[in-house]
Image (cartoon, rainbow, N blue to C red):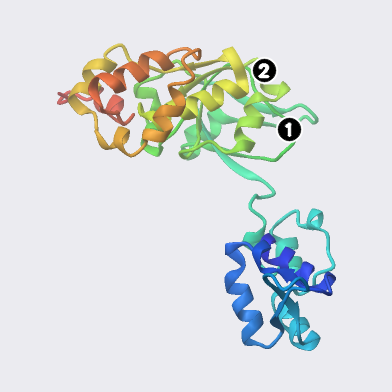
Amino acid sequence: MRSDEITLLRKLQEQTDGVAESSLRKGTQVLVNRLHACGAVQWERGKSGRGRRLRISSVAAFDALVHDELPQGLNFSEDLVQDHASAVELRGDAKAFAGSIAEAVLLRTIKPGIVIQRTTSVTSVSISELSEIAGCAAISITDDSDWEFSGTITVIENADTFWRYELVLPGTDLAIYSAGRMSSRLLRWLASPPMQSCQILHWGDYDPVGIDEYIRLYDACGARVCLHVPDDINELILKYGKRSLIQSNLNVLKRICNRHEVPNVLRMTELFDLHHRGLEQEILIGKQFPNFG
């Protein structure tokens, strides 16, 4: 059950004179209909004669609906909903908790001796060994992750470019797969004190969304962040660019046009304005093959 629906149920329970119709949110209409259908509530005229108020007409029917939706009833604090398990227990819906207790991050390297370690213990993970054996490594990050690394990092938006990043950026020490939009937790980890010795390269699609992601990373980590832009970006956009990458993201384009103080943003928005096209990052892998062109 959603927060606005729970709020309405609590108001109905606490306010003996009912809830004003004008104060009801549109998103609660389905719940109001259900309350009516089971005989739990009824409409009454306000004392002033203006407007209607919704009030409980059958406590038994009201309580039955509440306990059908909320296993523990209405008397709980939202602060107790801290994971999916407590969301099911208290709100009867795992999706009521939007986050997760941890997040998996995929890492790759082609270099020997690349290790990531914890600052609070002797735990370390050889990214080099796992990449050679299994193709990649994975770590879990939480809201207070203490994984530490020193070196060059490339944050990569899409899967194929992550798995073959070495064709374009062989010099990077550690490749991180962002799986599209970076999570807030990933940004916090990259910005955390244990990661301050890293230089970070962002490599995503060359479109408003990709540049917006670069700006998010720059805002989190500052001047340690750079954008990977190939020397022939103009020619690539002209030949392989997609108009839909611009046309479907005009609101994002407008937003990033206000961030020209971030390095390379002005250059990219000028290219978008010139060609009315964006470019998918995978083309940079294709350039490495003999038949490209």
Quadrant location of residue 289?
top left
Query: Which residue is denoted by mark 1 in the rendering?
Result: 123
Q: Position of residue 159 (x, y in %)?
A: 40, 38
Amino acid type of the residue tagged 2 in the rendering: Gln
Q: Quadrant of the C terminus?
A: top left
Q: Position of residue 90 (x, y in %)?
A: 76, 66
Give the mark nearest the N terminus, 2 or 1: 1
Q: Residue at x 76, y 85 (%)?
A: 57
Query: Which residue is denoted by mark 2 in the rendering?
Result: 196
For the residue pair 133 and 87, the one nearer the viewer reads as 87
Residue 158 drawn above or below residue 269? below
Give the structural element (helix, strand or loop) at label 1.
loop
Give the structural element (helix, strand or loop) at label 2.
loop
For the residue pair 102 and 116, the one nearer the viewer reads as 102
Q: Residue at x 62, y 86 (%)?
A: 37
Whether residue 125 appears in this view of the structure is: no
Q: Position of residue 255 (x, y in %)?
A: 46, 28
Q: CA distance from mark 2 to mark 1?
A: 19 Å
Q: Position of residue 191 (x, y in %)?
A: 65, 24
Q: Residue at x 54, y 27 (%)?
A: 216
Front label number (2 vs 1): 2
Whether residue 142 appears in this view of the structure is: yes
Label 1: few (<14), some (14–19) or many (≥20) C-alpha neighbours in 10 Å: few
Q: Quadrant of the N terminus?
A: bottom right
Q: Is residue 95 left or right of residue 7?
A: left
Amino acid type of the residue tagged 1 in the rendering: Thr
